[in-house]
Image: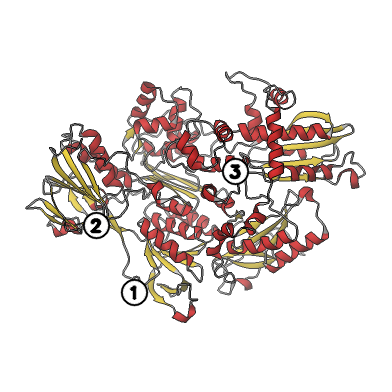
């Protein structure tokens, strides 16, 4: 029953920090001394702004909701949405709202956050100019992108938010320019070395970066330049005189505290804005408090969520009778920006007197790592990680503490003999009072105590018990390591949303005939899912034949490649790979591929799997290209999916004088049998017609080698990061036995392997019994697949037959269904307008991508100097350095 006996508390703002404060107070104020009224200016409840860009990955606004269940179900807590507080009367202790309501308070909390800063650029208020701050902003950007004519967007600001906005525009199918006044991207977080690598990696993804300049003006194009259903383009003039025609402009140049309400009420603000508060988050008026991005504490306004959460917790403690104080906040950040991992922590820019910098720069691997240490090299002060941020979770808590080892060794690649400590993922050197989760101020000691005291065995349990990992999520890898090193038997949960393993999840979906992710998470999970479980479930649903992967809810589960049935390349274009079973192709089909490549100006290459790659296709061209290929008799080669890729073959006994079996016919039959089957990882196979092994079958997941008496079957080989030869499973078997065993091998692997586990490591994992004892993995596999030791052979056989009988070419199905094709519609309203950030030069008679006037790093001709001439006139011999030209 709701009580009205408490003192009146009014909270202005229902953002992330304001909501965190309300929930923290609710936990502490068990006797309900406070009657809480919250006013939110937006029509939505508090949502996760940190994950705002997931909206463009298909996340619904509802999935971003942060309000705990039952938070405002009475008992003294009320939430009023779409109602802003417009005035504060400190003398009367009342607030007035936009709906004309006057509400009294005994304590007032300002959690008004910040507003996007828009530089004083002429034309910044024109239609087509946006900020990147709220869900409403994102919906407006999305709508504008659908009406775009030039298919180009520009982002003002190259910081955290700017690169997030750039990624969003790329996902909307736009070419993107990023303009940053500083000499590097993310100038507040990374140094010049990290910024240089970040720029290179970002440009390789097709984003044009303009540094050391600014947007000087935005002007409207002539109205007659736009089609009736398209928005007129804008012309953005940069400070260096460059003119860029664009469809929309997104200002992401920083934020400013929303402190006008406090100013109007006569409260003091900082020199650069923000309501002045003390260590208890109280203003000069004892009844008024401020937290989050609108507060200025010790002269600093924090623009990150972790310090805001810390302020909310401090204030909740104070209002519940405690005396907590805000201490220096952790401003460390770890993000994936445009697919590039970036992290910084502590004194990342080495501003401390005498600070030393230890740097490892690996441009080949695309990684940059720097540790900042004290002048005597004994204390870790900070660091920067770009490209590979896997060490962030273990390094960040050590800031301000003695180094556990040689700093260079701590940055050495894993497996390079760096020894113990953070360099190899160990947290043994992490002190008990080290802050593991800065968002919720959770120390290692608190986590260790929870693990031991509550018998926790999964990351999900640690998160639920301690709240660690429920903020930005950057500490989650460290939680897993703490569990492992605590000596407990770690649970097999797939992620925090599902307590079961992938194999168990597969069986649940199969047995219960679950058809959607929503049904699965409602019945056997929790929350809204993550980037771990969603792709896993997408693969499981596809493996079990639950409809086309672009139908209904499944479409939102796919990654970028599966979402568009094509592999995205480093320059933002896509590859097209038609299936050529066994490498056999007719002259007519060769001609068809050639004419498609010629007409769409695509780069062509014979792959190692005996197919032809067509590279350089723009997203909006994919349906037209595939229409031509499907009409010529081709189908999807599934080069984009975790599925069967190819079955490579020699010419076998049909042509070769050494061949003893018809390897080509078998390879074609196997590829057509298993085409399209989704699996935990990609599967490659090969068939060799004799022991000379011209098809290199022993380097494949499934390898078949002909013998005088039949076929030898090898399994578990691959050419991945840890190459492994396949193991001999069967010898001298007939074709029927061979195919039946491969059938069962594939289905058994699909059902029981872990997420993203290749057949090589899966086969090795079969060598460990349920009690940890060593068993002969191949003998076990034979007993299951050949002797039916588990009694599931009939199930495995039936599963393959269902797959074969229900197979449908994914691209042909897309072309035949306007609803599926509609996901490409927003990218075909200007089919003849190429992406202006991607041009091509001709090398060895074929187009090669050029970004910003330079060939893509790593491609032949990459040393060709930039010129002021058009890209098509850049001289390029196509001859790698050191190779004499003919």
Q: Secondary structure at mark 3?
A: loop
Q: Which residue is mark 2?
A: 258
Disc with the residue nearer the chain's start (1 vs 2): 1
- Nearer the observer: mark 1 or 3; the answer is 3
Expressed as whole percent of the image width and height from the top left, the position of residue 534 reads 51, 42
Expressed as whole percent of the image width and height from the top left, the position of residue 280 reads 18, 42
Q: Which residue corresponds to the image point at 35% horizontal and 48% vertical from the top-left?
A: 47
- Distance from the alpha carbon under mark 1 to that under mark 2: 23 Å
- Distance from the alpha carbon under mark 1 to that under mark 3: 53 Å
Q: Which residue is mark 1?
A: 122
Disc with the residue nearer the chain's start (1 vs 3): 1
Q: Residue furthest right?
A: 657
In this rendering, the count of numbered labels is 3
Q: Which mark is residue 488?
A: none
Q: Which mark is residue 546?
A: 3
Expressed as whole percent of the image width and height from the top left, the position of residue 496 reads 44, 35
Q: Is residue 63 visible?
A: yes
């Amino acid at each position: 029953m709701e009580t009205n006996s408490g003192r009146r508390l009014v909270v202005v703002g229902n953002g992330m920090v304001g909501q965190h404060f309300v929930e923290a107070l609710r936990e502490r104020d068990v006797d309900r001394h406070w009657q809480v009224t919250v006013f939110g200016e937006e029509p939505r409840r508090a949502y996760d702004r940190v994950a705002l860009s997931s909206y463009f990955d298909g996340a619904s606004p509802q999935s971003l909701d942060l309000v705990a269940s039952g938070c405002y179900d009475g008992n003294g807590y009320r939430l009023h949405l779409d109602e802003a507080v417009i005035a504060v009367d400190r003398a009367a202790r009342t607030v007035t709202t936009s709906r004309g309501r006057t509400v009294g308070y005994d304590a007032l909390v300002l959690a008004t956050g910040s507003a996007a800063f828009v530089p004083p650029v002429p034309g910044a208020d024109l239609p087509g100019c946006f900020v990147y701050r709220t869900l409403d902003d994102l919906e407006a950007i999305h709508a504008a992108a659908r009406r775009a004519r030039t298919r180009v967007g520009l982002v003002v600001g190259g910081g955290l938010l700017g690169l997030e906005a750039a990624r969003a525009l790329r996902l909307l199918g736009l070419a993107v320019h990023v303009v940053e006044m500083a000499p590097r991207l993310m100038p507040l977080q990374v140094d010049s070395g990290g910024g240089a690598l970040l720029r290179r990696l970002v440009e390789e993804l097709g984003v044009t970066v303009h540094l050391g300049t600014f947007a000087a003006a935005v002007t409207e194009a002539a109205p007659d330049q736009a089609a009736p259903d398209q928005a007129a383009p804008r012309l953005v003039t940069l400070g260096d005189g460059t003119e860029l025609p664009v469809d929309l402009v997104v200002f992401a140049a920083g934020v400013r505290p929303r402190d006008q309400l406090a100013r109007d009420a006569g409260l003091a603000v900082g020199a650069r804005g923000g309501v002045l508060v003390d260590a208890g988050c109280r203003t000069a008026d004892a009844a008024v408090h401020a937290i989050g991005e609108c507060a200025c504490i010790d002269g600093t306004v924090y623009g990150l969520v972790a310090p805001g959460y810390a302020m909310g917790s401090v204030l909740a403690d104070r209002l519940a009778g405690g005396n907590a104080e805000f201490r220096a906040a952790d401003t460390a950040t770890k993000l994936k920006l445009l697919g590039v991992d970036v992290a910084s922590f502590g004194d990342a820019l080495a501003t401390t007197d005498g600070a030393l910098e230890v740097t490892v720069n690996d441009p080949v691997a695309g990684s940059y790592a720097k540790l900042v240490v004290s002048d005597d090299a004994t204390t870790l002060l900070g660091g920067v990680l770009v490209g590979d941020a896997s060490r962030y979770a273990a390094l960040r808590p050590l800031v301000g503490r003695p180094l556990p080892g040689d700093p260079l060794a701590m940055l050495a690649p894993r497996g390079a003999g760096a020894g113990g400590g953070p360099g190899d993922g160990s947290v043994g050197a992490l002190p008990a009072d080290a802050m593991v989760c800065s968002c919720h101020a959770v120390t290692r000691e608190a986590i260790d105590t929870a693990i031991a005291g509550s018998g926790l065995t999964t990351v999900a349990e640690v998160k639920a018990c301690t709240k660690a990992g429920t903020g930005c999520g950057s500490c989650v890898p460290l939680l897993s390591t703490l569990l492992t090193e605590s000596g407990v038997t770690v649970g097999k949960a797939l992620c925090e949303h599902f307590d079961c393993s992938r194999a168990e999840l597969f069986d649940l979906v199969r047995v219960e005939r679950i058809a959607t992710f929503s049904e699965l998470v409602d019945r056997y999970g929790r929350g809204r899912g993550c980037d771990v479980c969603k792709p896993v479930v997408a693969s499981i649903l596809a493996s079990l034949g639950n409809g086309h992967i672009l139908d209904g809810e499944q479409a939102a589960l796919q990654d970028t490649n599966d979402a568009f049935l094509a592999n995205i390349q480093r320059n933002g274009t896509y590859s097209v790979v038609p299936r050529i079973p066994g490498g056999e192709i007719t002259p007519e089909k060769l001609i068809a591929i050639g004419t498609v490549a010629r007409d769409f100006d695509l780069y062509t290459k014979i792959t190692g799997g005996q197919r032809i790659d067509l590279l350089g296709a723009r997203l909006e061209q994919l349906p037209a290209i595939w229409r031509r290929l499907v009409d010529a008799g081709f189908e999807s080669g599934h080069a984009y999916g975790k599925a069967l890729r190819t079955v490579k073959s020699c010419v076998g006994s049909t042509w070769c004088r050494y061949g003893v079996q018809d390897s080509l016919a078998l390879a074609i039959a196997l590829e057509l049998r298993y085409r399209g089957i989704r699996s935990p990882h990609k599967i490659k196979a090969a068939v060799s017609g004799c022991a000379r092994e011209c098809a290199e079958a022993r380097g494949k997941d499934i390898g078949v080698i002909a013998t005088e008496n039949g076929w030898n079957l090898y399994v578990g080989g691959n050419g991945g990061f840890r190459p492994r030869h396949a193991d001999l499973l069967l010898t001298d078997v007939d074709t029927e036995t061979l195919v039946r065993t491969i059938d069962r091998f594939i289905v058994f692997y699909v059902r029981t392997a872990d997420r993203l586990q290749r057949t090589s490591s899966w086969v090795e994992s079969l060598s460990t019994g349920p009690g940890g004892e060593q068993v002969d993995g191949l003998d076990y596999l034979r007993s299951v697949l050949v002797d039916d030791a588990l009694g599931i052979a009939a199930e495995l056989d039936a599963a393959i037959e269902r797959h074969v009988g229900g197979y449908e070419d994914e691209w042909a199905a897309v072309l035949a269904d306007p609803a599926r094709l509609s996901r490409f519609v927003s990218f075909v309203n200007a089919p003849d307008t190429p992406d202006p950030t991607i041009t091509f030069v001709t090398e060895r008679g074929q187009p090669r991508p050029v970004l910003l006037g330079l060939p893509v790093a790593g491609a032949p001709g990459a040393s060709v100097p930039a010129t002021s001439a058009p890209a098509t006139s850049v001289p390029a011999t196509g001859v790698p350095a050191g190779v004499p030209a003919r």
